[in-house]
Amino acid sequence: RHGNALRTFATVKTPSSLFTPLDAFPERHIGPDDKEVALMTSKLGCDSMDAFVATAVPAHIRIDTADITDSTIPALSESELHARAKELGAKNKLYKSYIGMGYHTAVVPPVILRNVMENPAWYTPYTPYQPEIAQGRLESLVNFQTMIMSMTSMDIANSSLLDEATAAAEAMVMAFVAANQKKRTFIVDTAVLPQTLSVLRTRAKGFGINVIVKDLNEGMFEDKELVSDLCGVLVQYPDVNGRITDYAALTKKVHESKALMTVATDLLALTMLKPPGEWGADIVLGNSARFGVPAGYGGPHAGFFAVTDKLKRRMPGRLIGRSKDTMGNPAYRLALQMTFTAREQHIRREKATSNICTSQALLANMAAMYAVYHGPTGLKNIALKVHGFTQVLKTSVEKLGYKVTNGPTFFDTLTIQASSSPAKSAAALHEASLAAGLNLRKVDDDHVGVTLDESVKPQELVALINVFASAAGASPVDLNSLSSSTVTESSIPSDLRRTSAFLPHPVFNTHHSETEMLRYIFHLASKDLGLVHSMISLGSCTMKLNSTSSMIPLTWPEFSNIHPFVPFDQVVGYRTIIKELEDDLCRITGFHSASLQPNSGAAGEYAGLSVIRAYHESRGEQHRDVCLIPLSAHGTNPASAVMAGLKVVPIKTHHDGNLDLEDLRAKATQHKDRLAAFMITYPSTFGVFEDGIQDACKIIHDNGGQVYLDGANLNAQVGLTNPAVCGGDVCHLNLHKTFAIPHGGGGPGVGPICVAEHLAPFLPCHPVTKIGTSSSIDAVSAAPYGSASIHLISWAYIKMLGGKGLVDSSKIALLNANYMAYRLSSHYNLRYKNDNGRVAHELLIDLAEFDKSAGLKVADFAKRLQDYGFHPPTCSWPISTCMLIEPTESETLEEVDRFCDAMIQIRKEVQDVIDGKQPRENNVLRNAPHPISVIALSEEQWNRPYSRQTAAYPAPWLYEKKFWPTVARIDDAYGDLNLICDCPSVEDTVSAQ
Amino acid sequence: RHGNALRTFATVKTPSSLFTPLDAFPERHIGPDDKEVALMTSKLGCDSMDAFVATAVPAHIRIDTADITDSTIPALSESELHARAKELGAKNKLYKSYIGMGYHTAVVPPVILRNVMENPAWYTPYTPYQPEIAQGRLESLVNFQTMIMSMTSMDIANSSLLDEATAAAEAMVMAFVAANQKKRTFIVDTAVLPQTLSVLRTRAKGFGINVIVKDLNEGMFEDKELVSDLCGVLVQYPDVNGRITDYAALTKKVHESKALMTVATDLLALTMLKPPGEWGADIVLGNSARFGVPAGYGGPHAGFFAVTDKLKRRMPGRLIGRSKDTMGNPAYRLALQMTFTAREQHIRREKATSNICTSQALLANMAAMYAVYHGPTGLKNIALKVHGFTQVLKTSVEKLGYKVTNGPTFFDTLTIQASSSPAKSAAALHEASLAAGLNLRKVDDDHVGVTLDESVKPQELVALINVFASAAGASPVDLNSLSSSTVTESSIPSDLRRTSAFLPHPVFNTHHSETEMLRYIFHLASKDLGLVHSMISLGSCTMKLNSTSSMIPLTWPEFSNIHPFVPFDQVVGYRTIIKELEDDLCRITGFHSASLQPNSGAAGEYAGLSVIRAYHESRGEQHRDVCLIPLSAHGTNPASAVMAGLKVVPIKTHHDGNLDLEDLRAKATQHKDRLAAFMITYPSTFGVFEDGIQDACKIIHDNGGQVYLDGANLNAQVGLTNPAVCGGDVCHLNLHKTFAIPHGGGGPGVGPICVAEHLAPFLPCHPVTKIGTSSSIDAVSAAPYGSASIHLISWAYIKMLGGKGLVDSSKIALLNANYMAYRLSSHYNLRYKNDNGRVAHELLIDLAEFDKSAGLKVADFAKRLQDYGFHPPTCSWPISTCMLIEPTESETLEEVDRFCDAMIQIRKEVQDVIDGKQPRENNVLRNAPHPISVIALSEEQWNRPYSRQTAAYPAPWLYEKKFWPTVARIDDAYGDLNLICDCPSVEDTVSAQ
Ligand SMILES: Cc1ncc(COP(=O)(O)O)c(C=O)c1O
Ligand SMILES: Cc1ncc(COP(=O)(O)O)c(C=O)c1O
Ligand SMILES: O=C([O-])O
């Protein structure tokens, strides 16, 4: 055993002075202590950390050591960070927002807040690619899908998209593709959310789609030219102004035009409204945040997306399905589909029409849990209350002389005309509302909007009404004067009232007491391996510590209960954090400006490429549309390029992972006139610090292109090198990797882009909140700052580590990976090392040989690792026969050694197969993983040429601590043939009994 | 299957009006829904809930239905409660306190805050009497014991006491008992904490001990008379004024006098001070709160208690030891000792000298985790900082002309004379400190005290110094002017510097990164069954929902960071909550006044009896010293009586559990002149609503006695009957039972007493905070309001349920128990039903017959229940062959049915043994529980006449959800012979490898 004896005497640093805080974060964040570092560097033949780093990172890309230090980024201790977050939080004003426009003040059931959102067992796991150790969140995501399907009455729903606006963009592209990319007109109703329209405009550009905004009417189908080019229509139901329109006839017309009908809708309203699936919608989408997810100044929250059966194989995003394990027991999995694989790294590349990878699993789970807790009746009660309050408001303002302009129909939103009343102008109403500490929607000079939600208390309704009273010079009302007897469904057109049942599944009708809910939450969590259990060494995904100090402020109301469209003076705290984070990210990347709007890495790629296109366009070079991308790139790269309207030209890589510079030069020269961009991941997806990066960038620049650096691997760079020094013009960062936002079991994420000065004017703007410049591209996300609340996490991470801690983290990340390479390379085929024998922050081992010698594939190693209590590393990417392993700086030598021990022991198990001591079919690897239910099989059923002990406890530490998979290996073939993506129904349940 | 199909369609209530909040708590708290209630009542042959209740609760003790309603106790919804708590929290002023006197502002490491204190997996489990499903917290409590032993250098430590003052009282009694209760003088140094002294005075009374407060000196041993009566001495080290005294010579003298030397000390100081164990202390005690437990306006926190080897068999409280399971694997358990058993219900009764039952497990675990996280070096760093800051303060105030009166020695506390300086009076200093938002200790008119702690930031030190500058009319200092170079150990006498190592055990030297700490916390939690898993039907312990809404405010700084001795105007919020809680408890019990000071039920009993004694005394009847107690009483009852100086006279109970009224009458008459009190639990410990309760109380009153009602079973009463109607004069309540404070794995608890008007003047006072009357008894806890922060939980529970919810809860608690009795009584021997065939809120089943018929004992049933995923009910109490089962109102019918199914299935397994189908020795019950490691045994080792499936999955639901014990049955005999109460040492670890 390597680590154990040593770690037993972990060293603790002694502070340098009396006034040094004792709760410094770097010591807590970084796993190995000084002694372990010394041991590892010496094993690697170096006498100092710096000597080691010099062997790993090419000298010519190193940045000045003065760039990232405790002077440039001073470190706050954990308690100092807490105090600073409190101070900034106090600078956000907690006004009550009735702005609506797709955002509400959610009521998060406390049991879900504490036990899902604030529980590392839920927020630290990875995307559930390893279903045997992820059945808990897979089940919950199926609950989410089922909820969406049931509420919308659609055939199939995915397990979340980034937000409503990007979901609408996916729908638009789906409509375009469904029409074979031949018909380019996409009509959007005028009363769609403005941020949705903005994102549609951005997305339409790359595909050459024509977005036309119109007041919809059936008459428009007279225009034959329009119809012949029509691929889809988007409506909002109810619309942004509150109106509820019957689109059944329109939908027919759309279908007659062979176009797709897309409906953006509201889950709560659907408890009372006839669901779009019942009147013919092809695609239904929206935002699930009002189901118990805090607004957080814009996010994160889960967008939803549901389609008819015939569109299901084109579904973007992740789809969870039910399958069986090898024992025949039901089990959930990420469903593979015909048109793309579930491993996002294998996204459809050049043929892709969507690039979504990281989605919003944690928030989808919260929304699903909210539905589980409330059940159909509870949800209906909430809707009736919101609707009833809106009725009271309407009656009250009408009594005051205001005109409500959304006609007779509404669910929770009213548009109110000021000039019809003594208030005269919208300005008077906004003045009165701000004085009362509340926000109304700014519609125009004469109208305001009001949207109610579950959080509104009777006294708040009174205060809201009194804003209108005060602006009208009337005397205030009190609660007693408000009749509560007016609640009817009359403001919903009778044809549009929901008559169908929803959420009849057992799971939504069982867990309604807090005790049951708590047990359900814990039961699901108990099936999932997260960072609370052991290292998750996912190459290219950087699963590091998600510190509690950085997570705590998130759920403070001063950060969580803020609408994204409030005036700037209400978010001074938020904007300070955003500014500081942008500045720090620029310092770290060497760039000039940043945008935090993209909600994921892939969204960042797309935003960055769009910025590059806008730049070329600004110089009259809109024809530049070729994007060079190495073959080894992550699947999102080519997908994003295609979405940005670029033609992908692949660049070869050498066997060792290095870019083929000659091929690059050839292609760049060949496409000189049309060269828009070159996308490259650095260090490469093989875990390589390529020497030629600067040369490569020069080639591109010489040929008129811009360089996009994929920053997924930034963890190897921080403070040692940076994308600017390497020669890039723009990069995205995955804050959910390098900057410690938890993976949430598959999202949320933040994929900010940082750009050089010449690109800064083109960073995205927003249609509601005034950011950006006149040259800005349109929005890429619904909210101005994307998933604003979780920016806090990365901000805290950077502030607590400080410059030195950031650099040390990168160094230790390199050291851990190289130590692991050192230990594993005598047992496995390490695909790449540099001339000094070094990898970067991750290592690629190739298992190809074992297919021949033992009939074993990567999956067999991966599943067997589960038996050792580990989450497997990234499998079969970037090379199908490989594992990409990234330990990160947060893992101690003890844990790294434990993982190596497991891998080495597995290698011995493999040798037994090679040597014929164990059969090729029926062995511990092929049969892995071994859940308890298998260990408990009777002797006849067991029927394996190895013992239960060997199966379950192949390493001594497992007796004390082992995470157990809860199902046996899952049958992908069965799952693909039987795509069941909703919860078992009552019938299933009964028949199974 | 009973519940499942039904529960699948749980009903949700529809609100009665538009303005009714939708997040009403009763629906979430109460398990069964209306349909389930209807089903259960009908199974019980009743057509309504009220009809059912009438059959269970005797009519003549029913209270007016108007007493407890939503008008008398209005219900707040969950969000309303949150808002109200925020509002009240804002009325507490967050001044920085330097008051010291045993309380500090703790720095809680965020990873411990979120994952222990705020994690229901840690706070909901029961006391670890079932070690196979409690290895996690048992290990953590051993860490606590080891930490105490190591810091104090004592041979053995227990796993916590209620607080420092009660620990001192336990020490005093131990000294008294060690001297065979013959020598009655106990000398306390003048510089002991005043609250400790007050509690000593209370406790001394019952035992007739003479507490003498003196400035200690060796000369006092000249006084032969004194010495001959001396049983013990108590000193504070460092003392309340900050001085550090060398007590080695004094200790020698104490030992020569055959008395015990007791030392109250401070864990942080012991990192630098020679530990008392090294200079001869017999007993060392204190408060562990500064190790990461929030002050919470007084508590809860863990008192500690350590003794020399020769005193270990007299140790009060719980002691965790290491033993082995039947497979020979190491396992922890509550150690049985010679002088008392670990089941507190079997406390030593009349011979007891301590009554401690519920202790402070959760807080002990937090303190232990703090030491695990910081390790010895980290702790030393913290001590050096605190000491260094104190040195800077001293230098600074001396420079300003103040005299520091604690002589040259100090650790973290200074006593500063005002008149020696331009400040002139203490009043001027207090005025300046309040103006600066900070609190100093009030010593006297001329002196103030200042105590520093880990939380003090450099700028706060500056602000503190500037209070002294301002009072002295000097100009303020700034941080730069404070030299940090002065830090030395010189203010600790060289003979008293610690030279020995502490915490050398691996566990304190491993988990220093946050990732490791998180994994350790989760790993331990994964071994423990709590309410997050399944019902814990512990008769007499009421394990109900501990709602998240009631837990959330606890850890807000406005409640957690408040010193117990701040002026009243800084705790307006706290005092409002305390007042409201007292009022509600009085309303519920029918009494006049309440005291929240007792930290546990047992402490409440003792307080209540002391109040009764004071009452008698006030009437010149101090000779009344007989206490009648039924034989079936909980062990704490007689123990408390003895501690209050009462002679216990037992009263018989009938076989059916009813009190023998004739015996009562006879004994009451017999002891008429000396009758002080009668203690009785109602409903009785057999789960009986005895008809004769009022008659019994009348008998007592007629004979001059007072009636003490043990309110542990109040959950059966709330809103239906109450202790006052039953005829009591005083009762204690277990807020950690009926009023939903989580058990915390063995504490904290709150045991308030409610009293009739004539007893109100005698409720406890406090020596520092002015509460009580001139007739009050002395303090029973260190803090004026005991464990103040957790009062919030019960306050929230009552406010959120409201009157109706409270009554409904009692009714459903009765219903669930009676439904369970109905299902189980055809399979088991139900010990008691009333004339209508009803039990109260719990049921007693007798397993005696199976000993004969199958060789099976209660423990075999209990351990087998673990295999079904359940925590066993209360075992072997109040009758050794019985189980006492209490489902509570929070469990759904489905869960109740699942438990019944398990019990019925076990009965079948028993039948197989009776019928000879399974052997009497080697069967599923005798071998239970079956951990995974046993299931994984090889075929030869398995060697059992039943299958692994039968062992592991005896019921179908277990395939989907099962909590696994982590060790096999634990060998009590081995553990008793080998009392190992600390962590394995490095040597153990190494030799085991
Ligand atoms: C190299 C690389 N680029 C881009 C991405 C996409 O990031 P996201 O999942 O946040 O969309 C990933 C994600 O794993 C990646 O590894
Ligand atoms: C009947 C009865 N009385 C008193 C107590 C003592 O309460 P505590 O454990 O809080 O000291 C208990 C605890 O189980 C009990 O059941
Ligand atoms: O597939 C990934 O999420 O990297």
Image: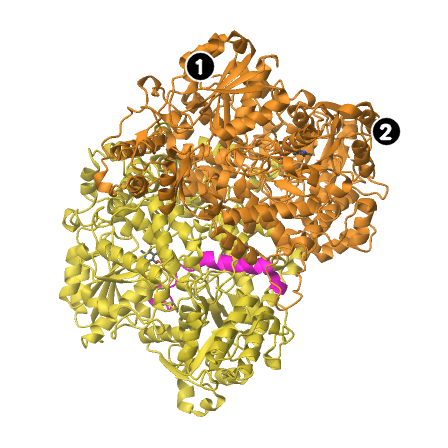
Chain colours: A orange, B yellow
User: Left or right of B123: which side holds B711?
Assistant: left
- Count every numbered label the image shows and give the total: 2
Q: Chain of mark 2?
A: A
Q: Nearer the viewer, residue B248 or A802?
A: A802
Q: Amino acid at mark 2?
A: Glu
Which percent across, then down, holds residue B648? 27, 67
- For mark 1, what is the residue? A280
Q: Split into 4 quadrants, where in the image is the N terminus of chain B?
A: top left
The answer to whether residue B193 is visible is no
> Which residue appears at 27% of the width and 27% of the height?
A488
Q: Is residue B464 magenta?
A: no
Q: Nearer the viewer, residue B36 or B952?
A: B36
Range of residues picked out in magenta: B349-378
> Quick check: which quadrant has ligand 3?
top right
The answer to whether residue B136 is visible is yes
**Secondary structure mainly formed by the magenta segment:** helix
Q: Nearer the viewer, residue B853 or A188?
A: A188
- For mark 2, what is the residue? A662
Determine if marks 1 and 2 fall on one subunit: yes
Q: Chain of mark 1?
A: A
Please report whichever mark, 1 or 2, sits nearer to the chain's N-terminal start. 1
* Quadrant of residue B862 within the rendered picture: top left
